Image: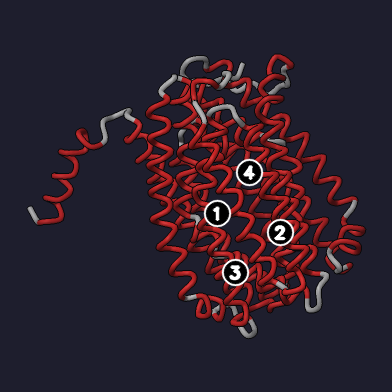
């Protein structure tokens, strides 16, 4: 038996001691592994796709793609009405104790998602021309905005179904879908960018979103049957309290952050050489996927686990898990952000001629991501403990700070917007950290 085989045998023999089956550590390790595998694979291919696309369509074209994606994110947030977190939390909380209730809440969330996303897609398609003229300073983008409305509907449904899978702790299925999307997206996007330019890139975005919505739907049906959770796709007024006390504040919280970011981008494209500056910001923001890889994984894995711990009254385990993961994220984020800062000029140069001038943009955005990592975990802790209205307040503070500073520093171009993101993220983390350090878990009213 060689040394590698001996090592695996030793690890297998000691697994039960380090990660007892069914323990929090075991659940976290399994969820983190599959989420890491899927997300890392997807992000690696996504970065390659972004770099090659930028080199093909140029700095201004990449800026136009960035503002289209930002506009999609705005309308997508308006359509989601906090349903993703709702499905994740309540499936995690009730899938064992009351699977029928869990299935009804998840099904109602899906039905509401179809209605809300279809409505916002119709609004975006109808208002594409006035938005592109009045807000985006680019009338030629109106036809692409209409195509983006289809992307909005398909990707929104895909996101809700991913939330259901997360609530069932089926992170392996999420990883499979992410890997499939990454493998198909790279060659198709590059080919269409080369042949059709920006129009081809948007077309592939729509096609991939539809395909992933179908695939994730099949995975949801399989996972729900495995857990014996009967999904009931109809609206039920008996769940109004859940949507009022959970979905609504979650929706409003997102509708403070995403519109503020979109408004900052819209402000940028109205400056001199606005779309060239937007190209720099979009290129730098591509590396956000790398910088927040581990924190993003932790957030998605921890939400169902923390919701389950909190619902069972295991407050000590709940808080220890949050504090431990925040410390871990701080260490990991320091390393990753440090690499982005030190290699900023090299990274930006990879996108093509003219992008190297955006090195300072990547530096400031990297620092903002360092603040965002623990902030996400603290937001998840408020979701798990039914304090979403309080989380809404903190997001409001961050959004107000971002808008104020973007207005003050927008004249500096992409660098000014990146600086605004950095300072606003730091302010939000400060108030969230103070609240978490001083609150008492047992005083929270349970969700009914």
Marks 3 and 4, how far apart at CA: 28 Å
Q: Badge 2 is on which residue?
A: 69
Q: Could you tell me which residue is drawn at 46 percent across and 40 percent down?
A: 301
Marks 1 and 3, how far apart at CA: 22 Å
For disc 4, the neighbor class at 10 Å (few under 14, some 14 to 19, many from 20) is many
SS under mark 3: helix
User: Of 446 and 235, which appears nearest the observer?
Assistant: 446
Q: Could you tell me which residue is drawn at 66 percent across and 49 percent down?
A: 398
Question: For residue 213, which numbered disc appears in the image?
Answer: 4
Q: Position of residue 307 (x, y in %)?
A: 49, 28
Marks 1 and 2, how far apart at CA: 17 Å
Q: Position of residue 437 (x, y in %)?
A: 48, 37
Q: Looking at this view, name the residue that lies furthest to the bottom.
A: 353
Q: Badge 3 is on which residue?
A: 284
Mark 1 or 2, which is nearer the eye?
2
User: Of 399 and 107, which appears nearest the observer?
Assistant: 399
The C terminus appears in which quarter of the rendering?
A: top right
Q: Earlier in the sequence, mark 4 or mark 1?
A: 1
Mark 2 or 4, which is nearer the eye?
2
Image vertical order of residue 426 relative to residue 324, above or below = below
* Among the 4 quarters of the image, the one containing residue 159: top right
Image vertical order of residue 306 relative to residue 379, above or below = above
Q: Could you tell me which residue is drawn at 43 percent across and 38 percent down?
A: 322
Q: Are marks 4 and 1 in contact (CB under 8 Å)?
A: no
Mark 2 or 3, which is nearer the eye?
3
Q: Are marks 1 and 2 in contact (CB under 8 Å)?
A: no
Marks 4 and 1, how far apart at CA: 11 Å
Q: Badge 1 is on which residue?
A: 181
């Amino acid at each position: 038996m060689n040394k590698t085989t001996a090592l695996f045998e030793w690890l297998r023999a000691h697994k039960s001691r380090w990660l007892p089956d069914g323990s929090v550590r075991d659940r976290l390790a399994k969820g983190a592994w599959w989420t890491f595998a899927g997300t890392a694979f997807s992000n690696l291919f996504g970065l390659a796709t972004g770099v090659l696309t930028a080199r093909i369509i140029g700095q201004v074209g990449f800026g136009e793609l960035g503002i289209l994606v930002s506009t999609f994110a705005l309308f997508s947030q308006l359509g989601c009405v906090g349903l993703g977190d709702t499905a994740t939390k309540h499936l995690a909380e009730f899938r064992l104790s009351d699977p029928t209730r869990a299935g009804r809440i998840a099904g109602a969330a899906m039905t509401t998602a179809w209605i809300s996303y279809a409505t916002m897609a119709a609004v975006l398609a109808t208002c594409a021309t006035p938005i592109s003229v009045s807000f985006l300073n680019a009338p030629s983008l109106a036809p692409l905005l209409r195509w983006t409305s289809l992307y909005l509907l398909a990707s929104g449904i895909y996101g809700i179904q991913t939330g259901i899978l997360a609530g069932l702790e089926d992170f392996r299925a999420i990883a499979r879908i992410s890997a499939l999307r990454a493998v198909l997206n790279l060659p198709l996007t590059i080919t269409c960018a080369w042949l059709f330019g920006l129009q081809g890139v948007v077309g592939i975005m729509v096609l991939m979103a539809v395909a992933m919505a179908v695939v994730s739907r099949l995975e949801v049906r399989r996972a729900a049957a495995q857990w014996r959770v009967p999904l009931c796709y109809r609206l039920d007024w008996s769940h109004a309290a859940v949507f009022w006390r959970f979905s609504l504040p979650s929706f409003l919280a997102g509708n403070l952050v995403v519109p503020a970011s979109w408004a900052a981008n819209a402000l940028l494209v109205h400056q001199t050489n606005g779309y060239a500056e937007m190209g720099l910001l979009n290129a730098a923001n591509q590396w956000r996927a790398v910088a927040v890889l581990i924190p993003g994984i932790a957030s998605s894995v921890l939400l169902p686990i923390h919701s389950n711990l909190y619902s069972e009254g295991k407050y000590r385990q709940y808080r220890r898990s949050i504090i431990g993961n925040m410390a871990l994220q701080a260490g990991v984020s320091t390393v990753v952000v440090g690499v982005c800062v030190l290699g900023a000029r090299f990274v930006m140069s990879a996108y093509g001629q003219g992008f190297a001038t955006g090195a300072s943009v990547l530096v400031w955005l990297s620092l903002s991501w360092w603040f965002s990592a623990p902030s996400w975990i603290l937001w998840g802790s408020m979701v798990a403990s039914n304090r979403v209205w309080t989380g809404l307040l903190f997001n409001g503070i961050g959004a107000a700070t971002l808008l104020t500073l973007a207005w003050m520093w927008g004249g500096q171009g992409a660098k000014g917007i990146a600086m605004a993101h950095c300072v606003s993220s730091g302010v939000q983390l400060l108030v969230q950290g103070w609240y978490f350090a001083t609150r008492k878990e047992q005083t929270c009213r349970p969700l009914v």
